[in-house]
Amino acid sequence: MKAALAQFIFESNTFSPEPAHIDVFKKGGVWLDAEDDVRAWAAGTDSQMHGSLDVLEAAGWQTAPCFVAMCGSPAGRLSEACFHEIGDTLLARVKAAGPFDVLILHLHGAACAVGEDDTEGHILEKVRTELGYSGRLVLSLDLHANFTRRMLDYADAVTAYRTFPHMDFSATGERAARLALHPGSFSRAVAKIAALMPPADSTHFEGNLSKIIDRARQLERETGVVEVCTLPVQPWMDVDEMGTSIVVTTTAEEGVPLTGLEDLAQQWYDQRDAWQSHLTDWPTILSRLEYMNNDGPWVLADTADATAGGSSGHSAEALRLLLPLKDDLPGKVLLWIVDPDTVQAARDGATCFTTGDPAVQWEGRVVWTGEGNYRARGKAYTGQAFSMGEAAVIEAGQLQLVACSYPAITADPAFYECVGLAPNDALAVLVKSIGGWLPGYDADRQRGLLFDGPGACSMNFANMPFTGSARGVFPLASDPEQPIEIWRSEA
Ligand SMILES: [Zn+2]
């Protein structure tokens, strides 16, 4: 028996105005279109591909891992040209890998392109129609996928991450491979819930989402369902069919436990008034910053400008608010911003800067310039390499600002260490992250000071310029007309 495998991972924030180009993959991420390269990469990387290959090879299957495209950081919609290049390459590589018995596609589920809200559904449709593939197709998704009717129609079995912050890449790949090996045929059902859950309240290890994930495991045990995916969608997408989803894959013989699915969906929807954004106001933040935290630095989380959620990283909100206190703070405060002009000015020896959008005028002393490359050493993305491009460190009193060239994943002490700073000795560190800082800094929630400034990831969803069907979804609509909708596959 033989399986072909491909992986395409990108997350869109459609409120981020700039389209993403192919360099997001080829330069800032991973782009591999030769089987030997994919195999070598997967062997050394905690990834869905890694997990799937392990399980399939242990089962004695032949494998053809034919393509990987992964972004370095989420962003806006893919440009049309970028999406065509990815889609065309993936389909050509899958076609060349044939014939095979099972196709496993590791996709994100929240990748939008200019002119296409559902790139993953589009790819699945092309596999069925253009390539004419009618065998088993296993789909793995991110926990933040927006599950669509095309995904229901064209995939046979679905799994997804069960963690946020995400840390079960290989385990998800293993589950996908077990679905590939599973005997018999599948049927599927989806509960689409008209609600957007704040990502700050959707970690797998505590709070409201963790209860739903536990119930999903219980549903699997009690009903013999093969797989239940709980998907609180990436909320910053103004797209069709927007909403939270529960996706059930079961064997054709067992059938879909509709009552169990509806009950779980109702339980999730009924939580909505208890969902928390965990935001702190600035007077409270400033009172915390009057003293050092004995457990480690305070984590100033600029959730609205979270590059991990696809925002640009251009906001200087923390710099603006802390600048007047720069000489009075009891320890260093490490800040960062994506601002190539400030990096260039620092390299040119400037002492006055205009930084961020909206811009802040300030004076500082350049203490470091260079290329910012690092490997995560915290408990998320451990060992993975990231780059922020050309960077500079500029000091003003107790503030140390890292300006860099492009968005990066920042919720890890290695981010600041690679430019010569000491985050663990600091009073506070800024991250542009929603939940990744918890494992990244091995911190508990009490150390987090989350704030909502300018940016494409505001936790106040009602302030975001939604125009489409998401306007009918909680909390944009206080009382959605049809809060839970059930979709079923043709068994
Ligand atoms: Zn995600």
Image (cartoon, rainbow, N blue to C red):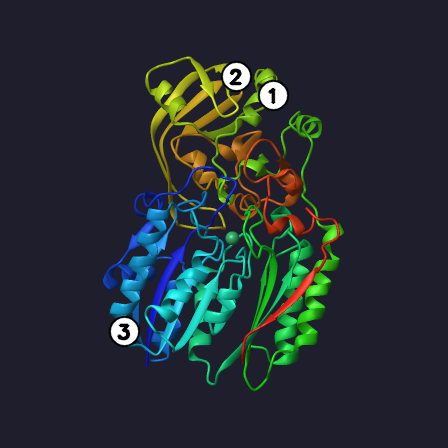
Q: Give the spatial CA distance, label 3 vs label 1.
A: 63 Å
Q: Element at badge 1?
A: loop
Q: Element at badge 3?
A: loop
* Residue type, label 1: Leu
C-beta proximity under 8 Å, tags 1 and 2: yes
Labelled disc at residue 26: none
Image spot of residue 430 (x, y percent): 54, 33
Which label's residue is closer to the chain start, 3 or 2?
A: 3
- Foreground pick, 459 / 210: 459
Image spot of residue 452 (x, y percent): 62, 34
* Residue type, label 2: Gly
Q: Quadrant of the N terminus?
A: bottom left
Horizontal side, residue 137 vs residue 225: left or right: left
For mark 1, does the 10 Å Cα neighbourhood hold few (<14), some (14 to 19), or many (20 or more) residues?
A: some
C-beta proximity under 8 Å, tags 3 and 1: no
Q: Give the spatial CA distance, label 1 vs label 2.
A: 9 Å
Q: Eyeballing the image, is 237 above or below 487?
A: above
Q: Eyeballing the image, is 412 above or below 367?
A: below
* Residue type, label 3: Gly
Q: Eyeballing the image, is 8 above or below 393?
A: below
> What residue does disc 2 label?
397
What residue do we see at 53% from left, 24% from top?
A: 358
What residue do we see at 50% from left, 33% from top?
A: 423
Horizontal side, residue 201 vs residue 319: left or right: right
Can you tell which of label 3 and label 1 is closer to the viewer? 3
Labelled disc at residue 98: 3
For mark 3, does the 10 Å Cα neighbourhood hold few (<14), some (14 to 19), or many (20 or more) residues?
A: some
Q: Give the spatial CA distance, label 3 vs label 2.
A: 62 Å
- Foreground pick, 44 / 176: 176
> What residue does disc 1 label?
329
